[in-house]
Amino acid sequence: MAELSYREAVRDAIATAMRKDDDVFIMGEDIAEMGGSMGVTQGLLDEFGPERIRNTPISEIGIVGAGIGAAMQGMRPVVEIMYEDFLTLSAEQIVNQAAKHRYMSGGQLKVPLTIRTQGGAGWSPGAQHAQQLESWFVHIPGLKVVFASTPTDVRGLLYSAIYEDNPVVFFEHRTLYGLKEEVPDELEPIPLGQARVMREGEDVTVVATGRLVHEALDAANQLEEQGVSVEVVDPRTLQPLDEEAIVESVKKTNRCVVAHEAVTRMGFGAEVAAVVQHQAFDWLDAPIERVGAKFAPIPFAPVMEEFVVPHAKDVVEAIQRTVQRDGD
Amino acid sequence: MATEVKLPRLGQGMESGTVVRWLKQEGERVEKGEPLYELDTEKVTQEVEAEASGVLLKIAVQEGEVPVGQTVAVIGEEGENVPQAEKPEETEADETEVDETPQEEGSRAPERDAEREEGAEASAARESSEQVTEVRQPDRNGRVKASPLARRIARERGIDLAQLRGTGPEGRIVAEDVERAEIAPAEAPTAAPAAAPPGEVEVVPLTSIRKTIARRLTEAWQAPVFQISMSADMSRSVALREQLVELAKDGPKPTISDVLTKIAASALMRHRRLNAEFAGEEVRIHPSANVGMAVATDRGLVVPVIRGAERLSIQEIAAARVELVDRARGGKLQQADLEGGTFTISNLGMFGVEQFIAVLNPPQVAILAVGAVEEKPVVRDGEITARPLMSLTLTCDHRAVDGADAADFLRTVRSMLEEPGLAL
């Protein structure tokens, strides 16, 4: 067992695939000499050289478009969009091209492209650099969407994403890069579409993604002292969604909270809530609670940013609402 | 600040009471001291007054037996937030009511909207529970607020959600409530059953009063009692009573019972061992004669007490008696009216009963049963003559009273009835 940070785990997944397979290469802004804005790709240039570790101009639509072209020609490109806020610039290529070619060509073409990106609040990067936009892409048929929350998961899932024959939008959360964990020496691929029960519990299921997985685990520890037993489920892959695992958990606990850093309204959690209420209606003992950011741009002022995005205490409060009894 | 209305302890030994009906509706304004609801205790049904002024925000217990101290309602300021337990869905009738009191509109209308929004969720289950609800609780034909899980468990186990009390937010029935209900089935509602068709046994559940009568008289039956009886010539008492009636003018007209109460009280002061309670290891002899009179009401027998009867005039006794009997028949007796009796008189003379034996009213040690005043032949000075006689039968608890004491007392009563001046 080796200890890897989330950052190192991402790098290890890329390097492992690149060592194994010449078709894998990476492209993005400042990913070569600089090693990426988050340091994720540091050292890769030395090992793999500029042919396979390619800096690009500042043109997100160009980066993704080039990736799509290479993918359709049989490569397995991993392109990086420096901040997920900039996915807006490449949305045409992702939504209208990458997601559609396999369908429109009747399966003659495949787009085995991985679009890595990162984002999130916590460092006060301001309204244009701190968003969580995963719900835009889970809404597009033809795309797969991953959001990993631990070193082990990000490593195994990124590797699987690289070998996925459909385009994958792969979200990382910037505050997680320093998170360390013991991981297996040998990379173990994790199939897309499988949720992970991060913590078992009896009273309520928290379905959380990204940073909120850790906030939910924190909340669970706090509530354990109050006698509330919390199960935390991380879907890990948002599209396709492991509905079975989520529903199974809720059928056990009879209560559900969904939690993500993205804005609550129309967020990914709304879909989870819909799935749960439909498939586990007769098992619900309380309304499903949602935790997410307030419906506002992420403020620059740290104290305001902190106020807008959710934390463990918000998860705690939501859980308490689901287990609340009159007189509490 | 909302005030919780808790079931009061109206007398020593009162553990619970039965909420009979509410005199105010949810949302209605109440003033401190106004009658709020009717409470049926072991001894009486009485109106309970509001302890605070404000709006009756919530009735937690519409009817039924409740332990002392439990919250039965909440009074607070309009719009104040209280958990809204078992709020019945507004019916058309309720709408009319609301219209009559427009100040409620502001606070209640949005609440209803919110309920309607949630209504779809419950509508399916409502159909199945509604029929039962209507039969058992005609005033609650609203939907039942329950979680889907609670509904499923109830469905699978055949439990009627309408009979449960929800402990979830806003009174929602949650799974745990149903689980609990299965362990301890909800008490059967006390509403009187419909009249039985001919040939069938009519089952009448005991009211609180009836239960008390049953319990106390069963207790009394265990006491080792003896009875002695005498007849009193009532000529002078009847004459006295007629005089008093003439003097009464507009006031209450004294009866033979009032004369007897006064005389019994005077006699008790001279034979205080009879004016006592038997308390296991001791006999408590009271300094004053608090004479209970057995009163038949359509709810059952009650025994209101005339306090310090030895100090009252017959007129005053008559006034007290009229008031107590009126209140007893109207179901308006207070707990205090029934407490502290030291001796009881039961008079069935008005029903033409010549003589009977009363059952002890514990912990009192004696009770006097009185028959009708009737003309009977008696031998006086060797002659048979007709005299108005009244039978007196004294039942005594032999643990506290011996036969000679009882006979002494009864002889005094008889002497005083025959010569009322002796009571002075």
Image: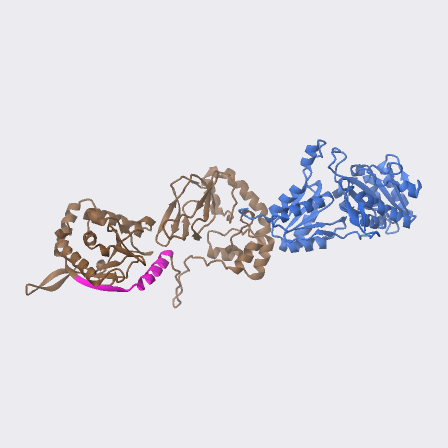
Nearer the observer, A245 or B417: B417
Q: Residue furthest bottom?
A: B199
What is the letter of the blue chain?
A
Q: Residue furthest left?
A: B382
| Residue at image location 74% in from the left, 33% down from the top | A126
**Rendered colour, chain B:** brown
| Residue at image location 51% in from the left, 55% down from the top | B164
- Magenta segment, prevailing SS (helix, strand or loop): helix
Please give left or right for residue A130 compared with residue B393 in the image: right
Q: Residue furthest top?
A: A301
- Magenta span of residues: B208-230
**Residue A135, percent from left and from top:** 74, 43
Instruction: Inspect the magenta stretch and tell me whether residue A133 lies in it.
Output: no
Check the image and tell me how it is coloured: by chain
Please give left or right for residue A207 compared with residue B115 in the image: right
**Residue A251, percent from left and from top:** 65, 55
Please give left or right for residue A19 compared with residue A200 in the image: right
